[in-house]
Amino acid sequence: MADTAKNAQPSAADGQTRRDFLLQAASTVGVVGTGIALWPFVHSMNPAADTLALSTTDVDLSAIKPGQAITVVWRGSPVFVRSRTAEEIASAQAVNLSELRDPQADAIRVKNPQWLIVVGICTHLGCVPLGQKPTDPRGEWGGWFCPCHGSQYDTSGRIRKGPAPKNLAVPAYQFTSDTTVRIG
Amino acid sequence: MSGFKSNNTVVNWVEDRLPVFSMLRHSAIEYPTPKNLNYWWNFGSLAAVTLVIMIVTGLFLAMSYTPHSALAFDSVERIMRDVNYGWLLRYLHSNGASMFFILVYIHIFRGLYYGSYKAPRELLWFIGIAIYLAMMATGFLGYVLPWGQMSFWGATVITNLFSAFPLIGDSIVTLLWGGFSVDNPTLNRFFALHFLLPFVIVGLVALHVWALHSVKSNNPLGIDMNGPQDAIPFHPYYTIKDLFGIGVFLMVYMAFVFWAPNFFGEADNYIPANPMLTPPHIVPEWYYLPFYAILRAFTVDLWFIPAKLLGVVAMFGAILILFALPWLDSSKVRSATFRPLYRQFFWLFVLNAFVLGYCGAKPTTDLLVTVSQVATAYYFAHFLIVLPWLSRKEKTLALPASISAPVVKAIAIGAMLLIGATGFSGTAQANTATHELLKPEGGFSWTGVFGRYDRASLKRGWQVYHEVCANCHGLKLVAFRNLAAVGLTPEEIKAIAAEKEVQDGPNDEGAMFQRPARPSDRMLSPYANDKVAASIHGGAVPPDLSLITKARVNGPNYVYSLLLGYPDVLPEDAAIPEGKMYNTYFPGYAIGMPQQVFEDAVSYADGTKATKEQIAKDVVTFLNWAAEPELEARKSLGVKVMVFLALLTALLFALKRQIWKDVH
Ligand code: FES
């Protein structure tokens, strides 16, 4: 030990830089790797392939009379399918867009004015609004009334009053025939 | 400890109220460690890392698993097929269990070799045994959860062990089951306990480390540290050494996860649990095999004690005897390095454990029972006769004055791993098939490190399945949409799905109705239920093929051989019952399925000549894809992970050398 002491100074300094470099390189690689390794765990909580694949629901419209509505299940959530009366269509179309919190013309919310198809989930905090049954409260605009915190939707499913920020969402759908529609 | 002061006021604020920082510094940084620890001392920290991996993967698996006897098997397959990276989580978990036991066994044998159980480390040793027992329980409970045949019958056999106890035995078993056989209540409680026990283990590990830090680590010389010259601080010396060890370990672990994920498993566990049918040869998980051999070694009653009870008592005794070890071995010298005779007996004991393990893995024969009996006798003799005798008689070598003095290096130990690797292969092969399996010319495309499915073969195989197999066999874990991976377009998939009718409903009138299948539907069996299938096929139900290549030992070659295994001329002694066919490769030779693979049985869309061998190879390729759709993603991710780990481990090794270069 004693006879190497005089050479120790430069080589120790060399060793120090080398050690610092290795320490930094190893830490960087280790931290990055651990970070990447977390992704499979997080991603495993996202919807699985079979869940994503179950994304269409067929609805038979033939039995729904004007003024009536049905609720169907799509991706585990309620979807409101409503056959609107002429007055309901007229009132939905007559609205001045500047009055709306989330301005959208009725025409872009429907494919066929008779049929309003919206996701039946209040955009406030996720309750299912009332208004599907004739005996339900439908709010001042004759659409839906959310019992949780009082949001009111009109006959186009647009938010008119209460805490909800957005209109009821319109799911992707297509008419597969005059009387059937495929949601999703 | 009280002298801790940092420049950081937040740290000081916390430290004054809860001395975590001084504790950390005391036990993870300054902790004085013998400077001569060899790599056998890495296994404790490796086991701790594995415990964390097991808990994390287990937690995420639990988010997708359903502990119900009717749903559990399929929920595991859903994890394998549909949950994002679910296959990775599951293979990490199932192989992690085996890794955990390998590490802990090495850790235990290291303790035995270097006398780490002796005073003052008896409590440390006891806590270690408690951890091992808790691991055994956790491993067993976890193996039941996939609810395959081995899960179910393993659960049945192990819980029935308790019925050996006189008077209360049967009541205990009923209590464990929550019914009159292993069933849904059993699965529910096993899941709950399997979730709980790892946290108990974490608590025990904390005690283990605490006890370790009060008595300090043993070392290869087995002598106490004399003073500061024998010790070095834990950090950075052993933190870097442990990290390097982790890098090497992860590479071994990941090699199994990505390339041999079912190496430690049993093919039978890919068959859903069937309470009416025990598989021909059942074995527990490999880590219980030596004890299983001890259990089976007792075949005759002793006076009034039934053999069954003897076996159970011996099996539990084989573990519990470890608690008496510090007193059975009273030699003052700890390390086998200085106990020449003990060292021989130690290796004899290791060998004996492997012999027991081998016996436990194989079907019982008279010879193996005798071997098990001798090995069991020796197992107990080692503790009850050899060790006490050695403690008194052995002439130990002179101990060096201190750790710093040069010593003989530990002897090479690789033999242990070697016997293990050779003894392990193919544990649960029911030795019914005596004929060597056929292999396709050129082998299967997907084997090997970079193996991928041959796309053309896969598509042809689908055609064979669709036109031939599907007439009797379902593929219920595969949805039509999955066929995109085979190379079908969305339109083709829609059209193929629409050929099949599936039940749906109830409609608004409350009636069930048939509708054309959609891509998201699964390829169900053509029969409404097993009873219909059995009545049509003379009592035999055509099995679902989703997992067939995984559910048979050497599955791809087995299915390939089976399809081609109908000889033109039957052997003279072939006695085949009415309505059955002769098949060279089927266990028992009498198979319900007539030959399906003929020259030109299909006419391939791509013009390939449909020889028998070609058809068989193609359909096996397709069926293996159905069983392991994740295979390509698995192998390609594996290559990336390995490259990364190699880089990291190399850096850690270089850093370790830098840090350690001045320690002598
Ligand atoms: S959730 Fe509908 S108003 Fe709050």
Image (cartoon, coloured by chain):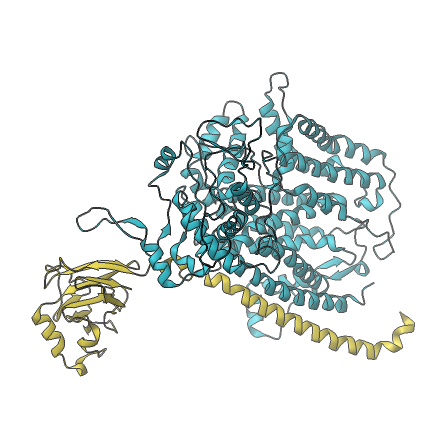
What chain is colored yellow? A
Residue B20 seen in render: yes
Q: Residue furthest bottom?
A: A98
Residue B141 seen in render: no
**In the rendered image, the vertical position of residue B441 relative to residue B583, given as above or below:** below
Give me the residue at 76% from left, 69% from top: B658
Quadrant assignment, res B323: top right
Tell me if B555 is positioned left or right of B530 in this view. Answer: right
Q: Residue furthest right?
A: A3
Taking the image in four quarters, ligand 1 sits in the one at: bottom left
Residue placed most toward the observer, B590 or B209: B590
Q: Residue furthest top?
A: B303
What chain is colored cyan? B
**In the rendered image, the vertical position of residue B441 relative to residue B23, given as above or below:** above
| Percent position of residue A134, x then y | 10, 60
| Percent position of residue B178, x then y | 42, 34
Q: Quadrant of the N terminus of chain A?
A: bottom right
